[in-house]
Image (spheres, rainbow, N blue to C red):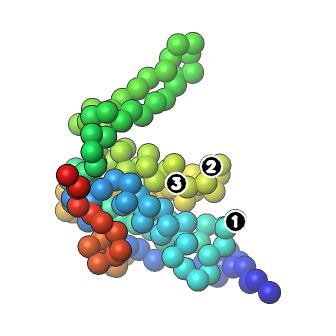
Amino acid sequence: MTKFLKKDQVVSKWYEIDASNAVVGRLASVVSKIIRGKNKTTYTPHMDDGDFVVVKNIELIKFTGKKFSNKKYYRHTGYPGGIKEVTPEKLSKTKPSEVLKLAVKRMLPGGVLGKKQLTKLKIYSGNEHPHSSQNPKIIELNKLNVKNTIRN
């Protein structure tokens, strides 16, 4: 018989990831698993039992191939003919955290649950963040089975 968690049984932890020289997609997949709670044995698909993730040094994140200049993100203003596109190169100059946030958002479920889980992602430029009092556990991408180097 499958046991599901109740709201009062959920315990959230804090994790910290250094994004320097990490590939966007590989980092986003690790982050989305932690935010959803898929790294826990108590994973419940219809509940928010994930953990908080603090990502630092977001300005040092990398893309493989020519995606940095060729990939396009689309959005619509709501007006006729109002489709807008932006490349990661332009987006990272104005909002460097938005690149990772979009990648993680697209790996989470759509709807209310996904929006609630996305609030557990905290992204910061530089090495400092205001969540050090939560004592986040540091996750090193090098030690995971994830390649974080750029292929030539």
Q: Residues within 10 Å of mark 1 (few under 14, many from 20)?
A: few
In the figure, residue 116 lies in which quadrant? bottom right
Residue at 59% x, 72% y is: 49
Specify whether 3 is left or right of 102: right
Would you say the residues marked 3 and 2 are in contact, meaning their CB atoms lie under 8 Å apart?
no
Separation of marks 3 and 2 at Cα, in angstroms? 9 Å
Residue 7 % position (x, y) = 67, 74
Q: Which mark is residue 107?
A: 3
What residue did someone put label 1 on? 46
* As drawn, 147 above or below 77: below
Q: Which mark is residue 28?
A: none
Give the residue type at disc 1.
His
Q: Nearer the viewer, residue 60 or 145?
A: 145
| Label whose residue precedes the other's in the sequence (1 or 3) | 1
Would you say the residues marked 2 and 1 are in contact, meaning their CB atoms lie under 8 Å apart?
no
Specify whether 79 is left or right of 137: right
Give the residue type at disc 3.
Met
Q: Residues within 10 Å of mark 2 (few under 14, many from 20)?
A: few
